Amino acid sequence: MDSIQIVLDTNVLYAGLRSKRGASYMLLKHLNTGKFEINLSVPLVLEYEEVLLRKLPTLNFTENEIGQILDYFCQIANLYEVHFLWRPILIDPKDDMILDLAVRANCNYIVTYNTRDFSGVNQFGIKVVTAKEFLKTIEVI
């Protein structure tokens, strides 16, 4: 069986690092368990870094630890260069970047808390779900 392919929106990563309670944290705990694979592109990693460093005062991590977390993500993820753009499709250009990656990586899911912002993604065969909905899909909760 092929592994489930996902892209994590930045808001899910931030929520999972901010609190040890909740679906986002549980999802991060299941990274590299074989239940699913995450997919990254350079622009998405740069967005993760920008947001996490900007919100560093609300996180219980140092700048160095954020760098280590992102390095770990890059080690376990499928890395893609995105040479084509499906833009503009979504309201937010940063969300279009996530859609571009999801299409390129042939993802099954985009995991986000802004599901309404990804209206129309289903035309690419991609489901948009929250972290809790995804955990139910992989039968973790």
Image: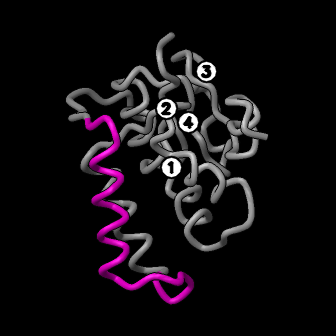
Say if mark 1 contacts mark 4, CB within 8 Å: no
Give the x, y percent position of residue 63: 34, 82
**Of callouts 3 and 1, which one flags the residue occurring earlier in the amino acid sequence?**
1
Give the x, y percent position of residue 131: 68, 46
Amino acid beneath label 2? Gly
| C-alpha separation, residue under disc 3 versus residue under disc 1 | 17 Å
Amino acid beneath label 1? Asp
| C-alpha separation, residue under disc 2 versus residue under disc 4 | 17 Å
* Magenta stretch, main secondary structure class: helix
Circle number at residue 110: 4
Q: Closest to the observer: 89 or 136?
A: 136
| C-alpha separation, residue under disc 3 versus residue under disc 2 | 25 Å
**Residue topped by disc 2:** 34
Give the x, y percent position of residue 64: 30, 80
Q: How crowded is mark 4: few (under 14 residues within 10 Å), some or many (20 or more)?
A: many
Q: Which residue is drawn at 37% across and 32% down?
A: 100
Circle number at residue 92: 1
**Of callouts 1 and 4, which one flags the residue occurring earlier in the amino acid sequence?**
1
**Of callouts 1 and 2, which one flags the residue occurring earlier in the amino acid sequence?**
2
Residue 108, placed above or below residue 113: above
Circle count: 4
| C-alpha separation, residue under disc 4 versus residue under disc 3 | 10 Å
Amino acid beneath label 4? Ile
Q: What element carries label 3?
A: helix
